[in-house]
Amino acid sequence: MSVWGIVLGILLAIVSIAIIVVIILQEGNQQGLGVVTGAADSYFSKNKARSIDAFLARWTKVFAAVFVIFVIALNVLAFFKIL
């Protein structure tokens, strides 16, 4: 295995762990019976774009995109036998 393969493999493992941690830190999307009665529209739900959940959701997308790029890069390197 070449240096690029080792570096990309380590980065892939780090990004995988980061995705797991960010997903575990997110709150559930369950609103219970408040949805039926209209009580789910609270101050916190209206400002969700600025909350920690929005921050974690944004980083989940970033880490997922980086994960896909690293997987594709490793497959391309393996296909051309550069690894």
Image: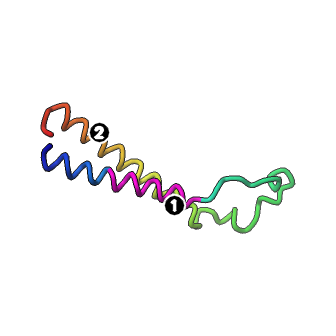
Rate crowding at label 1 as few (under 14), some (14 to 19) or many (20 or more) other CA atoms within 10 Å.
Answer: some
Q: Nearer the viewer, residue 65 or 21?
A: 21
Q: Nearer the viewer, residue 22 or 13?
A: 13
User: Taking 22 as reference, is 50 left or right?
Assistant: right
Residue that carries the numbered disc 2 in the rendered image: 72
Q: Decide which of tag 2 and tag 1 comes sooner along the chain.
A: 1
Picture residue at 54% right of the left edge, 61% below the top:
25
Picture residue at 73% right of the left edge, 68% below the top:
43
Identity of the residue furthest to the right in this view: 37
15 lies above or below 73: below
Residue 46 is marked as none
Magenta segment boundaries in residue numbering: 13-26
Q: Amino acid at mark 1?
A: Leu
Percent x, y of residue 32:
78, 53
Rate crowding at label 2 as few (under 14), some (14 to 19) or many (20 or more) other CA atoms within 10 Å.
Answer: few
Q: Quadrant of residue 52?
A: bottom right
33 lies above or below 55: above
Mark 2 secondary-structure assignment: helix
Mark 1 secondary-structure assignment: helix
Identity of the residue furthest to the front in this view: 1
The quarter of the image holding the C terminus is top left
Percent x, y of residue 4:
16, 48
Residue that carries the numbered disc 1 in the rendered image: 56
Q: Amino acid at mark 2?
A: Ile
User: Taking 16 as reference, is 44 left or right?
Assistant: right
Please say whether residue 48 is one of the residues in the magenta stretch: no
Picture residue at 39% right of the left edge, 51% below the top:
16
